[in-house]
Amino acid sequence: MRSALLALALAVTSASFAQSRDPNAGETKAHRDARMKWWREARFGMFIHWGLYAELEGEYKGVRTPNIGEWIMHDEKIPVADYAELAKKFNPVQFNADQWVGIAKAAGMKYIVMTAKHHEGFAMFHTATDGYNIFDATPFHRDPIAEMAAACKKQGIKFGVYYSQAQDWHHAGGAAYGGHWDPAQDGDLHEYVRKIAAPQVRELLTKIKPAVLWWDTSVGMSTEDIDELTAAFDQDPGLIANNRLGNGVPGDTETPEQFIPATGYPGRDWETCMTINDTWGYKYFDTNFKSTSMLVRNLVDIASKGGNYLLNVGPEPTGLIPAPEVTRLKEVGIWLRANGKSIYGTSASPFKRLPFNGRATVKGDTLFVNVFEWPSGPLTLKWLKTGVKSARVVATGERLELGKDADGNVTLSAPKKLDPVSTAVEVTLDGPAVVDEPEVTIAPQADGSFQLKAVEAVLDGRELQVEGDGDDANLGYWGRVRDTASWTLQVPAERAGRFTVDMVYACSPDTPDSTFELQVDGKSSGVGGTVAGTAGWRDYHTVHLQGVLTLAAGKHVVKVVPKTKPHDDVMNLRRFVLVPVAR
């Protein structure tokens, strides 16, 4: 369900460190808006995971790692000295910074974030801290980070760096999730921060001057360590940093990993980071590449929720970005050149739900609608209270006929040519989009039962999201007990009474035993249970919960509330079915 990188990003140090200083705590809203302006308009960026791990290509001593490629040193418990030997043959002579940046630019990406140092501890830039870097320790004898920064500047792309501030499996004192496996790793973490991490961050900020600093994992750090790491922030008051520094520092951006949050992060800037296949660092045998259609629709979905899409590529040890990744990026770029107006510089959708398979964004008095599957007749925009002046297809300029249905909703005629990935439509309004969307209420079925489906849930939380569409959709990425889902029911007098509850769910056999309860109007109903493992996250079972719900006539909110979560995730929930007890 979730990568080790995300699990570590969510790990926090002890509560005693929670009051750390935030470098941007005193800035005004106007200053923040100015600092974040380019980033908010960009919407699409390239993540690059590249390091010594690429040399292994996901395989160590003839054994393929089942995990992500850049964690191979940790997962295979490779001794420090043995792993360091990789540097002697790491010679990516086909690396061309101008080419990499050109690929990103052709894909429609507006910024790049590249690993300056990942958890393996190997610096991909020329650092004065020690010789464990690509310039001094390899026959390549070049500085890819500096070259990428220069190429980005030349081609008009913003450049940022990823830096693992605490985890370092090479240097003595560096943290390691789950503990060290080699005595060479032992030492003092705070001394490591002072002698290695903080000086390297200062080098990056003063020499490279990145637009973005992408922290990752804060295992075991103190407030003093945080201060050391952020001491050079005054070198660039425009710097944007994410939320993974740790110790209570919120950062500028939320960083959901490998998923798109159902409602985004209202009031916060956020960015989904995601792999183009199943790994961040290169694995020669990982060919599970996402389709171009999926990549475009992910971007559209993220933009519709007010976020950015940071899509990762994992270059080969030769210095080339894998050809299947380049092909897909080129195809995404073709779609964006025709339809990017509906993505760049837009804000989140004014709709909570759309009555068709698609997404919406807004920019000023313009509503953009991206339609994944056009309905058989006209497209209907429900609940839009702002007047509509005109509508046109973004890619072709074709003007669409406007109308109103029997309920007074705006209708748009179908274009002559539909985009099989997503047809973007520009709707010009009389003013800012105003949507008066009615509350979704669940009515009883003909047999008196209530179907509480995942797609109709109201989600409250940062991670919980709806996966899929229709009756087969589920609530997934349930990694926090604070995340809840609720449904509003309208119970007619003749359907009031007592109900048993069936639950349709799935759960990995490795992550059972979460507990939950159902609440009615904020009070415990007495119905709940313990999640048992199934054969996997897609193996759905129906279970009968203990207890009985009582619902009087009228409107009620039924909420599912996790109580305990001993493992990574609560469960995948497809639906609850409330079955009336025979009178």
Image (spheres, rainbow, N blue to C red):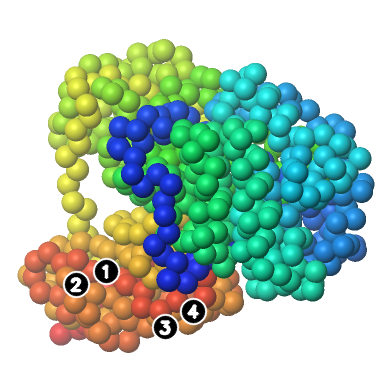
For residue 63, what is the image quadrant?
A: bottom right
Q: Local crowd at mark 1 within 10 Å, few (<14), some, or many (≥20)? A: many
Q: Earlier in the sequence, mark 3 or mark 2?
A: 2
**SS assignment at label 3:** strand
**Residue 271 appearing in the image:** yes
* Disc 4: which residue: 566
Above or below for 229 versus 146 = below
Q: Earlier in the sequence, mark 4 or mark 1?
A: 1
Instruction: Name the mark nearer the viewer: 2 or 1.
Output: 2
Instruction: Name the mark nearer the viewer: 2 or 4.
Output: 4
Q: Give me the residue at 32% from left, 29% from top.
A: 362
Q: Give me the residue at 79% from left, 46% from top.
A: 133
Q: Earlier in the sequence, mark 2 or mark 4?
A: 2
**SS assignment at label 1:** strand
Q: Earlier in the sequence, mark 4 or mark 3?
A: 3
Q: Give me the residue at 61% from left, 64% from top.
A: 190
Residues marked 2 and 4 touching at CB (< 8 Å): no
Q: CA distance from mark 3 to mark 2?
A: 20 Å
* Disc 1: which residue: 559
Residue 522 is tagged as: 2
- Amino acid type, residue under disc 4 in the picture: Pro
- Amino acid type, residue under disc 1 in the picture: Lys
**SS assignment at label 4:** loop
Residues marked 2 and 1 touching at CB (< 8 Å): yes
Above or below for 577 versus 443 = below
